[in-house]
Image (spheres, rainbow, N blue to C red):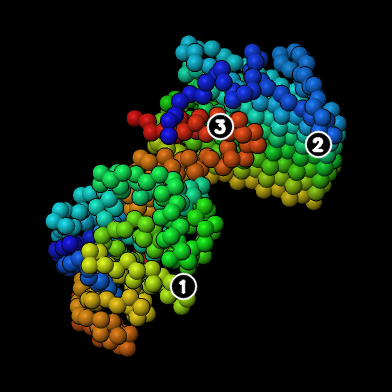
Amino acid sequence: MTVGLPSSSVFTGKSVGLEGFWLEARRPDGASLDLKPESVTNGRRLTVPSGCQATLIEKSESQRSDPYTTQLRWEFILTEGATLNHYKLVHEGPQAAHHSFVEVDVQKAASFQSHVFLFEGAQIRNTIHVRLSGEDADCLLEGLYVGSGSRVIENHTLVDHQKPRGTSRQLYKGILDGQSRGLFDGLVVVQREAQKTDAVQTNRNLLLSTEAKAVSNPELKILANDVKCKHGSTIGQIDAAQLFYMRSRGVPQAEARRLLVYAFASEMIEQVEVPALREILFPCLNLATSIRK
Amino acid sequence: MLEIINLEASVGEKQILRGITLKVNKGEVHAIMGPNGSGKSTLANVLAGREGYTVTGGSVSFEGKGLLDLAPEDRAARGIFLAFQYPVEIPGVSNSYFMKTALNAIRKHNGQPELDAIDFLKVIKEKARGVEIPEPMLSRGVNEGFSGGEKKRNEILQMAILEPRLCLLDETDSGLDIDALQIVAKGINALRSPERAFIVVTHYQRLLNYVQPDFVHVLSGGRIVKSGGKELALELEKKGYGWLPATEAPAGPPRSSGGEQEKAVAR
């Protein structure tokens, strides 16, 4: 398979534009909706009207080799019954810092989904704060982060369940090679009023070198008494039994390792509902997991 | 084809194989039997090149060339195949993609052209029918969620696709009901040929009712203590292992079973 940097000029038919994002929205009846974010201090605010569905794809890509910083700040407001799918792809230059802060207000029966893919950059900080401020609201936070060289990646998530019957799902997966550092720092708060909350928080890390480091800090703070909450984290290496199994069938060691890393990460991409984006993400993953040294 | 001379091997500090000598010619089926902890699985794993097993003495040559210095994938390319006692699950890598990758890696190593997706599909579909593996299982993750019997059938399927010259079957019959055993045995028998040899490691005689061996060897305390024809297996079934010539008790703490040792290494 040929592997190359996904070209910035081709977003497979979808123009990302100078602002680095692409937005599409539909009304409840399926008709197209002309939705635009508004500028606020230090960032943008996007309000998704009641019952409408929106997809926001954000891509930070650069081939600049000098040090620079990208600062992104979003505020999402999902009014009653609204849905927002937020996809974020970070493919910055080798010396770049990328700081992203996303604050979300999910109102009654609204649904927020976040899919974050952190591939390149020297220092990446991804912060997402979600407030489930209405009843029956839900959110899904997924992230894939890939570290190599001396990259430092931080993920900070906060899900604040404020009202009854909210659902939250979090799955963050890290692949760390070289001397890279990966952090998952997640907090789920269930307020006293938020009965029947259903929350799951998972972080899984795959260390590919002895010098790479993963720190996982999933936390639950539960003030209600009738809730279902679960959290867990794993930090592991390539499974020796799986590796031997593949090699005993004739698959060379480096290829077997690559396949196992790919398998660990690919489920995160398979869940992306935008085919054009999947077509970019798979080569990114290929590139990120290709054999170094 | 395979010549094992005075092979000694250890797992960690424990000496498991204490001088195995065995010659296997092409076309032959050798059964290795013996009580738990006798070194049967260790022998199979050492031949396949598993990490965690240290060869401490002796030699193994395969088709005239030394085997022990080769990486597992190079042994596979030369034509050695191990059907695992506990096949691992590999979620995220589809069964058919895995087999195609393996087959093409071996073909490439041997200077043969690689099969494209369409040609490979023909091969895998035909071979899967032979071991009664339905097509949907081919697109699932390798062994993912397969039952014990399905995993063993999948091992035989891989063997049929890779067409090895020497097949090592490590307790392939363990945990199989009679129907699954018959399917597995049929798959093995279909692969028997004058050019291919088998080493069948088994605790029980049961599989040997279906896959008739040319030779039976009994392993005990890391040595072959008795060899004979297929009638030896029947005798063992009747009398157990207790009547065999005693081997001196190994020094050190008692050994756990071969299965447990393997699992400990796999972790």
Let me know if residue A11 appears in the view: yes
State the separation of the CA atoms marked 3 and 2: 28 Å
**Mark 1 or mark 2, whichever is nearer to me:** 1
Q: Are marks 3 and 1 in contact (CB under 8 Å)?
A: no
- Asked if badges 1 and 2 are on one and the same chain, I answer no
Badge 1 local density, few (<14 within 10 Å), some, or many (20+)?
Answer: some
**Mark 3 or mark 2, whichever is nearer to me:** 3
Residue B77: percent from left, percent from top:
27, 50
User: Label 3, on which residue?
Assistant: A279
User: Label 1, on which residue?
Assistant: B180
Quick one: SS at disc 2?
Answer: loop
**Which residue is at 76% across, 13% downward?**
A39
Badge 3 local density, few (<14 within 10 Å), some, or many (20+)?
Answer: some
Name the foreground residue: A10 vs A102. A10
Image check: A234 left or right of B219?
Answer: right
Quick one: SS at disc 3?
Answer: helix
**Which residue is at 27% across, 73% downward?**
B31
Q: Quadrant of the N terminus of chain B?
A: bottom left
User: Label 2, on which residue?
Assistant: A110
Q: Which circle marks residue A121 in the picture?
A: none
**Which residue is at 46% across, 13% downward?**
A65
Name the foreground residue: A38 vs B157. B157
- The amino acid type, in three-letter code, at marker 3 is Glu
Let me know if residue B250 appears in the view: no
